[in-house]
Image (cartoon, grey):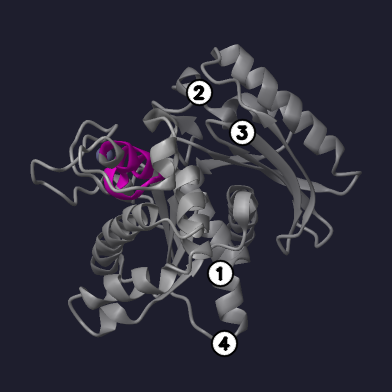
């Protein structure tokens, strides 16, 4: 039986960082820590680093009953077995079931899910979804979209994650938006994907291309080496009034709006939550209302336009909160059956 005093250990294992936290039933983070992931590490190295962090996190529960471990991980996951399949940012973990490996090792129940899917659950239970419900607004279907180096998403409808047959649904970064010859190459092998038009990678690529054009406009970015221009430098220049940088971000916002209109048509959400570093930059420049109105404007019906668009308030903790929410959700469903 789960008690109110119970906690979970949550982990968010991405390509860059491994984060861990002790989280209570209300989504309160009692302790958290992060360590760098070993980029390109072999399986044993990767696992040793994560296992050491789990041991520290279990110790930080300070004797409070541990209800289980929730792991959000960057890559396709079989949610029943906790097995990873060809994770692009953690290739050393292909075929590994953290559930089978760690349950006997740590003596606690473990649930594993994809980080974007669990981030959507985190927002639904502890973030924008909970805020909306507490202020009297119904939230039936929430789509969480992370706009960062890449673009990923998760969908939760009435507290259920929409995962698809193999746990691979909502790869919205790879919906093809531009089939013309102008469509930029994407890391998935296609051209003109949303990710190649509206991610952090797209911002730096577009800036580089335009700065190299012979009739390039004068910009503070012209002084930088083209290969040193990143999404961060473009956002900084835009915030200082640089028209060239602003025009790039206007195009990024337009690409994102097309993606959101598609999302409205496919999932009919009443709440879309945008997270990730690019969202933070766009939000600081006050660009979310124009993204909202542009995506709504092209929706096919009035009812499709009935949605709210907000920036995530959970920051880097969103994956861990989703992993914790997943543990509580599974335990609640065990108690009902
Ligand atoms: Zn793609």
Magenta span: chief secondary structure: helix
Q: Which residue is mark 1?
A: 128
Sort mark 4 into few (<14), some (14-19) or many (20+) by Cα contacts within 10 Å: few
**In the image: residue 20, left or right of residue 87:** right
* In the image, residue 183 above or below residue 101: below
Alpha carbons under labels 3 and 1: distance apart: 24 Å
**In the image: residue 264, left or right of residue 300:** right
Question: Depth check: 199 or 48 in front?
Answer: 199
Residue at image coords 29%, 32%? 187
Alpha carbons under labels 2 and 1: distance apart: 33 Å
Q: Are marks 2 and 1 in contact (CB under 8 Å)?
A: no
Q: Secondary structure at mark 3?
A: strand
- What is the span of residues highlighted in magenta in the rendered image? 195-209
Alpha carbons under labels 3 and 2: distance apart: 19 Å
Instruction: Single out the residue that lies furthest toward the right.
Output: 63
Please give the label number shown on residue 17: 3
Residue 80, x across and y down, in percent: 47, 40
Alpha carbons under labels 4 and 2: distance apart: 43 Å
Is 144 inside the magenta-drawn segment? Answer: no
Which of label 3 and label 4 is nearer to you?
3
Residue 132, x across and y down, in percent: 56, 78
Q: Quadrant of ligand 1?
A: top left
**In the image: residue 51, left or right of residue 147:** right
Q: Earlier in the sequence, mark 3 or mark 2?
A: 3
Q: Earlier in the sequence, mark 4 or mark 2?
A: 2
Q: Which residue is mark 4?
A: 136
Q: Secondary structure at mark 1?
A: helix
Q: Secondary structure at mark 4?
A: loop
Residue at image coords 27%, 42%? 210
Q: Earlier in the sequence, mark 2 or mark 1?
A: 2
Alpha carbons under labels 3 and 4: distance apart: 36 Å
Which of label 3 and label 2 is nearer to you?
3
């Amino acid at each position: 039986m789960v008690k109110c005093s119970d906690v979970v250990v949550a982990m968010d294992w991405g390509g860059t960082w491994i984060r861990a936290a002790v989280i209570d039933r209300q989504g309160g983070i009692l302790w958290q820590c992060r360590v760098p992931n070993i980029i390109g590490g072999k399986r044993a190295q990767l696992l040793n680093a994560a296992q050491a962090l789990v041991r520290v996190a279990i110790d930080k529960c300070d004797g409070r009953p541990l209800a289980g471990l929730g792991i959000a991980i960057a890559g396709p996951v079989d949610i029943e077995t906790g097995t990873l399949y060809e994770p692009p940012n953690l290739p050393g973990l292909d075929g590994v079931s953290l559930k089978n490996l760690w349950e006997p090792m740590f003596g606690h129940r473990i649930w594993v899910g994809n980080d974007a899917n669990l981030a959507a659950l985190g927002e639904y239970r502890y973030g924008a979804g909970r805020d909306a419900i507490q202020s009297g607004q119904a939230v039936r279907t929430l789509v969480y979209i992370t706009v960062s180096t890449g673009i990923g998403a998760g969908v939760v409808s009435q507290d259920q994650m929409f995962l698809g047959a193999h746990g691979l649904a909502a790869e919205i970064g790879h919906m093809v938006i531009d089939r013309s010859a102008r469509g930029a190459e994407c890391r998935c092998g296609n051209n003109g994907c949303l990710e190649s038009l509206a991610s952090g990678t797209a911002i730096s690529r577009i800036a580089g291309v335009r700065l190299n054009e012979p009739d390039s406009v004068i910009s503070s970015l012209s002084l930088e080496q083209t290969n040193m221009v990143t999404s961060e430098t473009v956002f900084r220049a835009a915030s200082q009034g640089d028209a060239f940088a602003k025009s790039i971000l206007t195009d990024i916002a337009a690409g994102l709006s097309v993606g959101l209109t598609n999302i409205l048509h496919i999932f009919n959400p009443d709440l879309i939550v945008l997270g990730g570093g690019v969202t933070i930059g766009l939000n600081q420049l006050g660009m979310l209302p124009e993204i909202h109105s542009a995506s709504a404007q092209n929706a096919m019906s009035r009812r499709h336009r009935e949605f709210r668009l907000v920036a995530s308030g959970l920051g880097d903790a969103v994956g861990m909160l989703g992993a914790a929410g997943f543990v509580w959700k599974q335990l609640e469903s065990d108690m009902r059956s």
